[in-house]
Amino acid sequence: MKEMTRRVTCGLAAVGIAAMGSVAIASPQGGAAVTHKVVSWAEPPSSVPDYILPFYGGAEDTILNLYDFQSLMFRSLYFFGGKTSTEALNPTLSIAQPPKYSDNDKKVTIVLKHYRWSNGTTLDDANVMLWFNMLHAEKTNYGNYFPGGLSIPTTIKSVTVKNPTTLIFTLTQSVNPKWFTDDQLWEPVPMPLAWTKTSTKAAAGSGGCGTAPYGTANAKCAAVYRYLSQQAGFTPTHPTKSNDALPTYATNPLWQVVDGPLHLTSYAVTGLLTMAPNSTYSGPNKPKYKEFEEKPFTTSSAEYDALVSGQVDFGYLPTADVKADASTPVKGGPNNPRLTKTFDLVPWNGFQISFTAYNFKSNGDGGEASKIFAQLYFRQAMQRLVDQPLYIKAVAKGYAAPDYGPVPILPKNPYTSKYEESNPYPYSPSKAVALLKSHGWKIEPHGTDTCIKPGTGSHDCGKGIGKGAKLSFDMLYLSGTPELATLVTAEFSSWSKAGIQVSPRAESFDSVVGTAVPCPKGCSWELADWGGYTDTGFPTEPVVFSTGAYTNYGSFSTPTADALIRATQLTNVTLTKMENYLSEQLPVLWEPKFPVSISEIHKGLKGVLPLDPIGQITPASWHWSS
């Protein structure tokens, strides 16, 4: 998942649940495997999949939409992770052969495997061109587009069709193949030509977007995009206007043309949905059950109740119901005694970073919030007041890993630097208070600090911060997950001891990520915590910390960060300089990285392990034992 898949992570220790309802079919003589009719899975609390078109804006660019919903029906050109122990490219589940680079890494050759759509047509170059032509026409409506940065389509000079299964991308400059493959080629999702239309009554393919040479049909592709977006529930001309398309997801013929292992059979706006196997699926791991089900829950306690009552196949144990601490976050401790006979406990560690975002363009507090966040000493003080080792033990019961920078420390990977692992800003309230005092703040423990030395000197509050300014901020965080509520409560208490007052407000996932968006001209949100961000194989973080990136939520910006990130995209350098700089500069408040979940997997459900480090589910691989 890279760019906000590198995705937005749905909260901490995302707890979901699956209601079972599985009915066993009698096995024939000889002990053949029992086939159950239903396999169920749960969505994280207060978070539901709500966008079906695999061409999305930033607000829809989430793991839940992309990896746990869309990708089950519509396969991306290249698949990462997927029931493997690594977040890297998965050649088996990709619908194209591994890319080949040539001409000093300026050309990329893509060869498609033999896949078919459920309407009987062959997946070919036109399906890939449909997505790329739509991107060329509507790049500003695409969540991973990076104006002025290195992203598709900016990096693509031309796309040449050699034959129906071979495309050649000519790039604008030489690139780091590792970056381009991992960071760019997870994005394209071939689309069926049945979608190339501009109205429901129009003939399939009449829109003329997929069959046109690259970049030559912008007007036609824009019209196709508008129609498809409206059918998916988003009106580009009125972005904030409500759209009643979501209840039609399972009945709209558009979304029944799939190349993935499943197709949608029912969908409710509450998030309850069912899927059935796609009988024409061309890939491996064909589903062996009648129905796959995703269920919504508003709280983790409701999910635990369902686990205990035996309604689930793949559930998630809330931290509050963990009865024994884990010795390491990789290996789980003893299971909950009420579950141990039926379920195996497996920690699900994602390739993620976890943080609270600062809004460096906030106009809150009369514009002083952004001025305060701009001061590195203030961010250092905030970080010094976050006791990650304590929170891992007390809040996560050992089921979490520290996070001190932009590259995950866990799972183990070849990119984490020794500097980041060393924890550049260990917990120290005395050093936090000393930093604030030395920069002109009057400390009021359990009160609110005020600026008494405005100015830009080395011992003043900082540029734009007036006398009497207060260290008082609002913070949005994800509702429905007790672990996150406990974490932020502990952080609030710690900050308050140093006179930094933070007022929390819990909201749904959609509300938090819909509010905490980049706002170059300023907006009112100040701090936001929805859990974090997930990477695929090469964690360069261009869309999280580069100037102007759509998913640079807090609008962090420095020339040095931009240059270091860009170097990892264009040259074969290590990530160390970039990683160390961002660890030191604190573009966000680093927090403990909770697992995707403390999973409870029914002992009879096989094919689930190893759990995917990107956080995506792969239900096509799941099956029941005899």
Image (cartoon, rainbow, N blue to C red):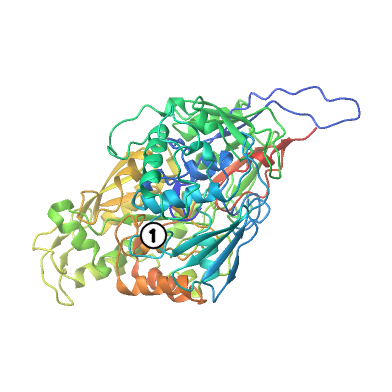
Q: Secondary structure at mark 1?
A: helix
Residue 538 makes an appearance in the image: no
Residue 125 x %, y %: 57, 51
Q: Is residue 251 above or below residue 352?
A: above
The kind of residue tagged 1 is Val
Residue 336 x %, y %: 62, 38
Q: Quadrant of the C terminus?
A: top right
The front one of 327 and 17 is: 17
363 with respect to 401 (left or right): left
Q: Residue at x 36, y 36 (%)?
A: 234
Q: Residue at x 58, y 49 (%)?
A: 348
Q: Is residue 82 above or below residue 479?
A: below
The front one of 442 and 425 is: 425
Q: Is residue 583 above or below residue 299?
A: below
The front one of 16 and 361 is: 361
Residue 238 x %, y %: 27, 37
The front one of 596 and 285 is: 285
96 with respect to 426 (left or right): right
77 with respect to 247 (left or right): right
Neighbours of disc 1 within 10 Å: few (<14), some (14-19), many (20+) = many
From the image, tell me which residue sits under label 1.
544
